[in-house]
Every structure is written in C-alpha cells, then in structure tokens.
Image (cartoon, rainbow, N blue to C red):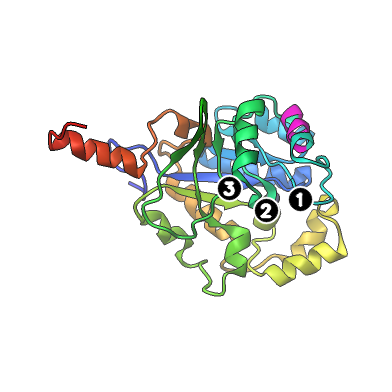
Amino acid sequence: MPAGVTAGMRPEVLLTFDIDWSPDWMIDEVSAMLVEGRVKSTWFVTHASPAIDRLRKRDDLFELGIHPNCLPGSSHGSNEREVMQYVKAIVPEAVSMRSHNLYQTSAFLFMAARDFGMRLESNAFLPGAPGIVTSDLRSDDIAIRRAPIFWADDLAMRDPQNTWREATTFSYAPGLKVFDFHPLHVVANANDYSRYESMKRQRSIPDWTLDFVKPYRSQGHGSAAVLKNLIAMLSGQPTLFMKELLDAEPVAAHGEISQASRQTGEVR
Ligand SMILES: [Zn+2]
C-alpha cells in the first residue's frame, strides 16, 4: 500500500497543477500521464482553451479550480475583484483556488469566498512540514477551508537544500501532502530555476513548443520524475480532488482538543 493511503483512512497525497498559461500540448501531455495512472488531480486554471475543455470532460479524474493573478500588470484585471470575475467566468464550476505566486490577504480570501463561491484555497506553503491539516478561515457566516501546499516544483528549484530526492519519500510523512506542479516544468523535467528564467527570456510561455523545450529537458531528478513516482505510487489507490477535502471535518488543532476533552469527560 502506498504512503499516505492507510487502510480505513482517507488518502493524504493530493496532486495539483498551476496551469500558468501553459499551451495546450503541455496540458495534454501531463494530463495523459494522470489518465494512464487513473490518478485524480486538481488544475488551477489561468485561461480558457480547448485543452481545458478536454480536462473538464473527464470530471472523474480532473477537478478545475482557478488560478487568479492579482500581481501588477495582470492580464486577468486591474484589481482583485476584476481578476476574480475574469477567472471565475472561465471556470464557473470552480470551488477551489490557488493564486498565482500564492498571493493572498485575509480580505481577498473572504471576498473570494463570499462573492465568488470559493470554498477551499491552497495558498499557504509549508515546505516539507509534517502533520499538515486543513483548517477553516471564518468571518461571520463566511468560511473558506485552507489546504496548505507541502511541496512545489518551482520552489524546490530555488531551495538551496535541494528537496528533489526527498520529494517522493516525503510522501511517507504523516499529514496532508498537497503537491504543486506546473505543466511547463513537468514537460521540461525542470530542476534549475535559472535555466527556466533563461527559457522565459527567450520566448513567452504560451509560445513554447515541444521542439523549443526538448533541448532543455533535464535528465534524472526534476519535476516530471517526482510526478511519475507519485503517479506510480497512487495508481490503483483511492485519490482525492482538492474539493473533496471539503467533505470531511477539518482536522485542526482545536478539533483535537475538543476530541480529547470528550474522551476525558471534561465538561466544556
Ligand atoms: Zn502560478
């Protein structure tokens, strides 16, 4: 039985993808790996395209969330509300979100929940932290569930401690493990951020072709190698969409405390 999937427990390794304006061939190439392994994943969408529509048709394997870009100069809009309107129009069914560059403020998250139906967000990054749980951020009658990221390919590239080798063995650690991949890094099996930046200087991402990417593909460790290992580990096991983390009670510390209180018979 693979790590994170213990008999009688819900699986705790979740695969997510930030689409980041990837051209369709990348989305098709990476999604084919997940179809072959029959592993569920959640894709945070930046733009409309035929490849996104193909993902939408396989709702047994792909959840579509949104990837709002609130940074200056965003093509999604000039303020947070415009950005949310833009991306929500592309994925009206979305209930899950992760911001581009993990942008967040509490006010932004509450607006996303209240006005755009977001029920789960994955913007907090706790690299390799053991025992990650979900918890609910609440304001009056608004609530949005937080599901922190455990490992991200783009941030692994910049981490001087180099977490590539550990990335798959990490999945044996206790707690929720949300892996964050980018199709543009998977297709290059990327492991070097300066190489990625040099590619981006030469050509804007939507214009990357297979022939352009091929010479830059890394051998050995890299984004694709980690993803392939995780797919092999999860294949044939029950896997989850991010939105399915809404089905369970959040496993936050205060829940454990009240559970402990009940066990000791303490009157609260
Ligand atoms: Zn992004």
Disc 1 to disc 2: CB gap under 8 Å: yes
The crowd level at tag 1 (other Cα within 10 Å; few <14, some 14-19, many 20+) is some
Q: Percent position (x, y) of residue 200?
A: 81, 62
- Outermost residue toward the bottom in this view: 160
SS at circle 3: loop
Q: Is residue 222 visible?
A: no
Q: Label 1 amino acid?
A: Leu
Tell me if residue 176 comes above or below residue 119 in the rendering.
Answer: below
Q: Is mark 2 within 8 Å of ligand 1?
A: yes
Q: Is residue 118 visible?
A: yes
Horizontal side of 216 relative to 128 (left or right) equals right
Task: Write down the residue under mark 2.
Answer: 101
Q: Percent position (x, y) of residue 64?
A: 63, 33
Comes first in the chain, label 1 or label 3: 1
SS at circle 1: loop
Question: Which mark, residue 123?
Answer: 3
CA–CA distance in space, label 1 to label 2: 8 Å
Which of the two marks, 1 or 2, is nearer to us in this view? 1
Task: Write down the residue under mark 1.
Answer: 71
Span of residues in magenta? 83-89
Q: Percent position (x, y) of residue 109?
A: 61, 38
**Which image quarter: residue 78?**
top right
Q: Main secondary structure of the magenta part?
A: helix
Please tell me which residue lies in front, 155 or 164.
155
Disc 1 to disc 3: CB gap under 8 Å: no
